Amino acid sequence: MNEDSLKSKLDMKLSNGEIDQEEYEELLKKFDELDLLSSKVNTKSKVVAVGVVKLKSEIVDGPVRVSGKLMTHGPLKCENMSISGSASISGDLVVVGTTKISGRISIDGDAKFGDKISISGKFNSDGNTFCTDILRSSGKFSTSKDLVLGNNASITGKLNAQSIRSNSPLSISGKMNVENDVLAKEFISSGGISTIGGNLQAELIEIAKEYRMKSTNDKSKEVGEGIPDLGSFISKLVTSFIPSVIEKEKPGEFLVMGDIRGSNIDISHTHIKGDIVGRDIIIGPEVVVEGEIQYVNSIDAPEGYKIIRIKDEL
């Protein structure tokens, strides 16, 4: 993706009303600071690493493809990147266009991606990671500092970061470990053993919702069953002795060390050290709240929690 195509995406978002003029100018300035709008220097047309390739600080006005081993002794900027082998970058990495990593890459500095990035291998950055477009990761994704997302992100593998900031929905079905806060437009997690070391804040927050829905549906079936026939009775009798075999595996505990804050919150199998604050809140099974539950409009929760209704100050 060149300067014109990245700017054209912003122009389209502005014309469609997805962003206003102030946000447009702020994003344009941010992209320029990230060095994503200046790809006109041409020192190499492309880099193809089949065996072992060593580079100094380079700007590549074309693709970087690695099926062997690539090592740089300085920062690297390129148009597109594809890694099926291994790459080690001694400095910052800037990819203006698309990125695909099915092998391994380690970056000593910041990583900045101007277009879609797909990771099925291993990604490690010792600095901040900026993804301005869609991120899809089914591998192992680690960034020692902040992960900043400008578009939708879907994580089905492992994610480690110091903090996460996203202007778009963030979907997690893998395992995540974030040292500090997570801030997103939407946060949807299938649950499981994960940790957020600070606060979780988003307009929509769902954690292990499918397990609450399954639990609700199972109870509804029990109420409406009536008198079972002989076959149903025998089936229930047998399965009552082997529930671990037929019961869907429950997720591990999702731990939030700080508060959960949002407009619509629906959580199950979650442990919150702080408070839950939201407009409309649903508390499903296996939820521990050490603080208070503060709601504005509606609350659906079992007994035993400290619940307070508050004014709309969210």
Image (spheres, grey):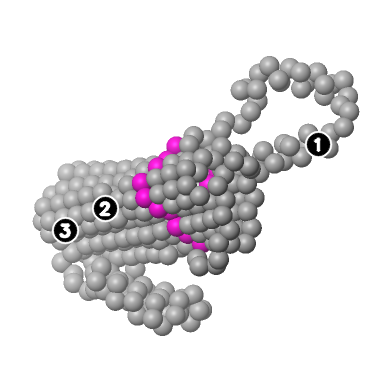
Q: Earlier in the sequence, mark 2 or mark 3?
A: 3
Residue occupying the point 31% across, 60% down: 130
Look at the numbered disc 3 and give the secondary structure of its residue. Answer: loop
Crowdedness near tag 2: few (<14), some (14–19) or many (≥20) residues, C-alpha within 10 Å: many
Crowdedness near tag 1: few (<14), some (14–19) or many (≥20) residues, C-alpha within 10 Å: few
Pick the residue in front: 145 or 58.
145
Q: Earlier in the sequence, mark 2 or mark 1?
A: 2
Look at the numbered disc 2 and give the secondary structure of its residue. Answer: loop
**Labels 2 and 1 touching (C-beta < 8 A):** no
Residue 75: mark: 3
Residue type indicated by callout 2: Lys
Residue identifier under label 2? 145
Quadrant of the image containing the N terminus: bottom left
Look at the image and tell me whether residue 136 can be seen: no
Residue type indicated by callout 3: Pro
Q: Earlier in the sequence, mark 1 or mark 3?
A: 3
Residue type indicated by callout 1: Val
Q: Is residue 199 magenta?
A: yes
Closer to viewer: mark 2 or mark 3:
2
Residue identifier under label 1? 223
Q: Is residue 279 above or below residue 87?
A: below
Q: Which residues are magenta?
A: 193-208
Q: Is residue 135 magenta?
A: no
How far separated are the C-alphas under marks 2 and 3? 18 Å
- State the image coordinates of residue 105 (x, y, percent, origin top left): 26, 47
How far separated are the C-alphas under marks 1 and 3? 64 Å
Left or right of residue 13: residue 39:
left
Residue 137: mark: none
- State the image coordinates of residue 280 (x, y, percent, origin top left): 60, 58
Residue occupying the point 87% across, 20% down: 230
Residue occupying the point 16% across, 48% down: 71
